[in-house]
Amino acid sequence: MTVSDLVRSQFPDASEEFCCLHGRSIRNSLLTASDWTQLPDAPCDQQAWAEYRQQLRELTADSNWPHVTFPDQPS
């Protein structure tokens, strides 16, 4: 499901601009929720999470934004 599809599943009449803005808000929430993974003593694969977080940051620069999919979180 693309970012715009996700936004429009919650807001069916959402404009393209709203999809971009709300998609960025979702992306920012995902980044915030994964901040803990970068703490020195975090019990996780920090490199995998760092790569995931970088992919999230790069999403909005994609020429297809917001018609892109969020990357999968590391397990």
Image (cartoon, rainbow, N blue to C red):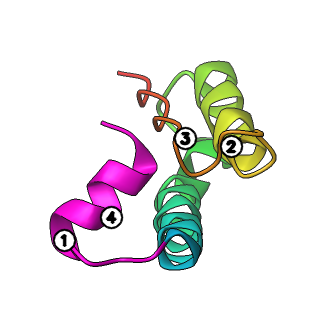
Specify start and end residues of the magenta stretch as a single range: 1-15
Compare marks 2 and 3 and give the one earlier in the sequence.
Answer: 3
Q: Is residue 32 left or right of residue 47?
A: left
Residue drawn 29% across and 54% down? 6
Which kind of residue does numbered mark 1 sit on?
A: Gln
Tell me where residue 53 sits by quadrant: top right
Depth check: give the residue in front, 20 or 55: 20
Mark seen at residue 7: 4
Q: Report which residue position mark 2 lands on.
A: 59
Q: Which residue is mark 3?
A: 42
Inter-mark Cα distance, 3 to 4? 31 Å
Alpha carbon distance from label 1 to label 4: 5 Å
**Dot 3, crowdedness within 10 Å: few (<14), some or many (≥20)?**
few
* Quadrant holding the C terminus: top left
Amino acid, disc 2: Leu
- Please report the residue visible at 45 percent of the width from the left and 76 percent of the height from the top: 15
Cβ–Cβ under 8 Å for marks 1 and 4: yes
Query: Distance from label 1 to label 2 (Cα)?
Result: 20 Å
Q: Residues within 10 Å of mark 4 (few under 14, many from 20)?
A: many
**Mark 3 or 4, nearer chain start:** 4
Which one is nearer the viewer's eye here, 15 or 66? 15
Q: Is residue 54 above or below residue 11?
A: above
Image location (x, y in percent) of residue 1: 30, 36
- Where residue 7 appears, as percent x and y from the top left, is 33, 64
Element under disc 1: helix
Q: Disc 1 vs disc 2: which is toward the camera?
A: 1
Q: The disc labelled 4 sits on which kind of residue?
A: Val
Give the label on residue 69, or none. none
- Residues at marks 2 and 3, CA–CA distance in whole angstroms: 25 Å
The residue singled out by tag 1 in the image is 10
